[in-house]
């Protein structure tokens, strides 16, 4: 065919011989009734035939396989396009009898390389509805494509290169307490690793993948106060500086303050099911107690003034929370100021804050290290927020592997490129 070169460019395929191009009605199950499909009959170019689909080694032909098969290509205009070719099997010394490789698609895939790259790029940039309507494929198919594309990226890129300061956290991705453990690089801001699970074995798997030599090069590890993270980091990175995120320490104080607020609220209403004017005002004051003083509205400032006059115990708990927040912002003086706060909390006679100061003393070294090295989990919290958005987008994927692949493609610094575009 004289136009074969045009079709190889249209389909973005290499090492491929175009034999024939035709237009036919879609078979049942391939599309809507009356839809037409461009069928491009092709074969691998000389030198690319009879190769193992897994390792690409030249092998002896085994049989003709199941005959001809089709691979979905990118649409041409408004018409669907497919590549049709023979699918013989070869006998690989390493992988046994397997379908021969084709240059236009990955082994076991039903879509061309260009189609996979486009679908993966769209999945990282667009909504689920946009991707499925534009490419005319199911959302689970998009998940499978993301997995395939990420496997190739992972094989070509060293994700752990130059890793020195890391942050570790977990995030829920489905109901019934299903979690992902994620690791980010504080220096590059990239998501470098993610896996399903939230326990010691999951985190050990990260350090196993990192290797003993690179693990020894880790200098700082930031995380929340989870004991399972502490135990693994202490065992695998004993020389790394452990940093306790100040954000989570303030969250502990906010939780302790809420315990006090609920106790005062229950005492004010005088029994289960009863409501008084005072209990209503305390319920509405929750956000005034949570917010930073500089962010309070005029109404919330009035609520705090009322609490200071009517409920001194709750107001003292609020001052303790604010005192801790300010103590963690003192830079090099954090240790001295925070210890003053600990003495104050020990004498406050508020059980929730007495327990809180015990937790702070337990994690003292990590909290002070975070202040001295100016390291927090802010980057991880930002990454978690983005993963939550991706989790909503990924609803309907059949496995967490597809979600992880989409998250890594979006946040790992290796977002797929659209076929035929020059790198910026």
Image (cartoon, helix red, strand yellow):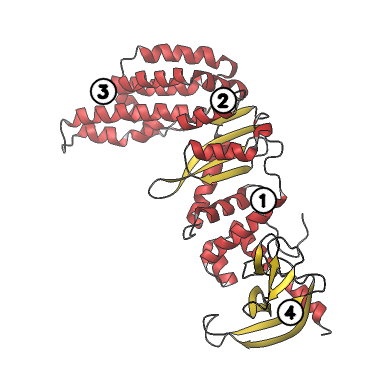
Q: Kindly state the secondary structure of the residue where label 4 is placed.
A: strand
In contact (CB < 8 Å): disc 4 and disc 1? no
Q: Which residue is mark 2?
A: 242
Instruction: Give me the residue at 71% from left, 44% from top.
Output: 158
Mark nearer the N terminus (4 vs 1): 4
Instruction: Name which quarter of the figure residue 27 lies in.
Output: bottom right
Q: Which residue is mark 1?
A: 154
Rounded to the nearest whole Å, what is the CA distance between mark 2 and mark 1?
Answer: 28 Å
In contact (CB < 8 Å): disc 2 and disc 3? no
Mark nearer the N terminus (2 vs 1): 1
Q: Which residue is mark 3?
A: 310
Instruction: Give me the residue at 58% from left, 53% from top.
Output: 405
Mark nearer the N terminus (2 vs 3): 2
Q: Which residue is mark 4?
A: 42
Rounded to the nearest whole Å, what is the CA distance between mark 2 and mark 3?
Answer: 42 Å
Rounded to the nearest whole Å, what is the CA distance between mark 4 and mark 2?
Answer: 58 Å
């Amino acid at each position: 065919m004289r136009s074969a070169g045009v079709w190889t460019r249209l389909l973005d395929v290499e090492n491929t011989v175009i034999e024939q191009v035709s237009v036919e009605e879609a078979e049942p199950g391939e599309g809507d009734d009356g839809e037409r499909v461009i069928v491009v009959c092709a074969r691998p170019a000389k030198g690319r035939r009879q190769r193992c689909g897994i390792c690409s080694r030249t092998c002896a032909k085994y049989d003709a396989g199941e005959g001809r098969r089709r691979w979905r290509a990118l649409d041409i205009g408004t018409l669907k396009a497919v590549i049709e070719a023979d699918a013989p099997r070869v006998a690989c010394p390493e992988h046994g009898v397997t379908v021969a490789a084709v240059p236009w698609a990955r082994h076991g895939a039903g879509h061309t390389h260009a189609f996979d790259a486009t679908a993966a790029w769209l999945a990282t940039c667009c909504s689920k509805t946009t991707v499925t309507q534009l490419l005319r494929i199911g959302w689970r198919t998009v998940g499978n494509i993301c997995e395939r594309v990420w496997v190739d990226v992972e094989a070509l890129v060293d994700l752990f290169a130059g890793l020195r300061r890391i942050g570790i956290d977990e995030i829920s991705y489905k109901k019934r307490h299903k979690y992902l453990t994620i690791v980010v690089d504080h220096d590059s801001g990239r998501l470098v690793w993610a896996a399903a699970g939230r326990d010691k074995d999951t985190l050990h798997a990260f350090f196993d993948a990192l290797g003993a030599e690179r693990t020894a090069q880790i200098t700082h590890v930031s995380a929340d106060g989870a004991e399972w993270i502490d135990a693994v980091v202490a065992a695998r990175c004993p020389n790394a500086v452990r940093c306790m995120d100040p954000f989570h320490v303030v969250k502990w104080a906010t939780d302790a303050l809420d315990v006090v607020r609920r106790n005062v609220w229950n005492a004010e209403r005088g029994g289960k099911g009863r409501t008084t004017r005072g209990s209503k005002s305390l319920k509405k004051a929750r956000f005034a107690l949570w917010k930073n003083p500089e962010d309070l509205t005029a109404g919330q400032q009035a609520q705090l003034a009322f609490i200071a006059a009517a409920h001194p115990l709750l107001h003292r708990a609020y001052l303790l929370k604010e005192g801790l927040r300010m103590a963690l912002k003192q830079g090099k003086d954090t240790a001295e100021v925070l210890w003053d706060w600990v003495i104050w909390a020990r004498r406050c006679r508020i059980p929730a804050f007495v327990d809180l100061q015990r937790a702070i003393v337990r994690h003292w070294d990590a909290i002070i290290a975070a202040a001295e090295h100016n390291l927090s989990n802010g980057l991880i919290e930002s990454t978690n927020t983005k993963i939550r958005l991706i989790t909503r987008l990924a609803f309907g994927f059949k496995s967490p592997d597809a979600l992880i692949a989409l998250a890594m493609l979006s946040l790992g610094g290796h977002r797929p490129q659209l076929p035929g575009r020059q790198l910026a």
